[in-house]
Amino acid sequence: MATSIPVSNLKIGEKISENVITKYNNVLFHKGRIINERDVDILRAFMIASVQIETKSEPEAAPEAAIEVPDTGKKPFYDHYDRMLKLLRQVFNNANARGQNPPILEIRTTLEDLIRHIDQYNILTFSPRNFQINDFIYHNSIMVALTSYILAKWSGMPSKDLLPVAMGGTAA
């Protein structure tokens, strides 16, 4: 069952039941997409008033339903993304529980591995394979790092400065 909901009332984890179309008749989001915070910002930027959302009796199942099967060409990117996600979980948990300094070299090398496949990352449409709301801060850190890297590259920064920009994005 679908319900039209204003963008201002959208909740993270809700599933789109119909394609979201821009005023120029382009598909912004496809049917079945799970809404995250970035998607809400994109909807506002495109001045979309409302979207059709599936109503479910099990609201807790929505974050688990965010699993998207990537193309085989995108597999290395998602593998490295998952490694980075796992590392950031460990870093945040160790910093909170034990007050340890973060392993900068390990974060850097894992981020470098992820950046090697950055051509498969689309700033506007990327959605993590296994998004859960309690992992939002980790996903956000990774996406800010990747987006910062791309923006720095687009702005013409020297290549030696791109990775430090991404590392700064990870800390955001």
Image (spheres, helix red, strand yellow):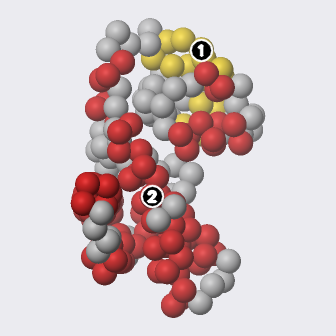
In the picture provided, is 61 more to the left or to the right than 2? left
Residue 70, how many percent across, how many down? 31, 50
Q: What's the amino acid at mark 2? A: Ser
Q: Measuring 51% from the left and 72% from the top, which residue is drawn there?
A: 168
Q: Quadrant of residue 96?
A: bottom left
**Numbered disc in front, either 1 or 2:** 2
Specify the label residue 116 is tagged with: none
Closest to the observer, 140 or 103: 103
Q: Measuring 38% from the left and 53% from the top, which residue is drawn there?
A: 138
Residue 152, how many percent across, how many down? 61, 76
Residue 59, how many percent across, how many down? 36, 18
Specify the label residue 4 is tagged with: 1
Give whichever of discs 1 and 2 has the lower sequence position: 1
> In the rendered image of this protein, does residue 155 appear above or below residue 15?
below
Q: Quadrant of residue 105?
A: bottom left
Q: CA distance from mark 1 to mark 2?
A: 31 Å
Numbered disc 1: secondary structure? strand
For disc 2, the marked residue is 141
Q: Is residue 125 visible?
A: yes
Numbered disc 2: secondary structure? helix
Q: Measuring 59% from the left and 90% from the top, which residue is drawn there?
A: 158
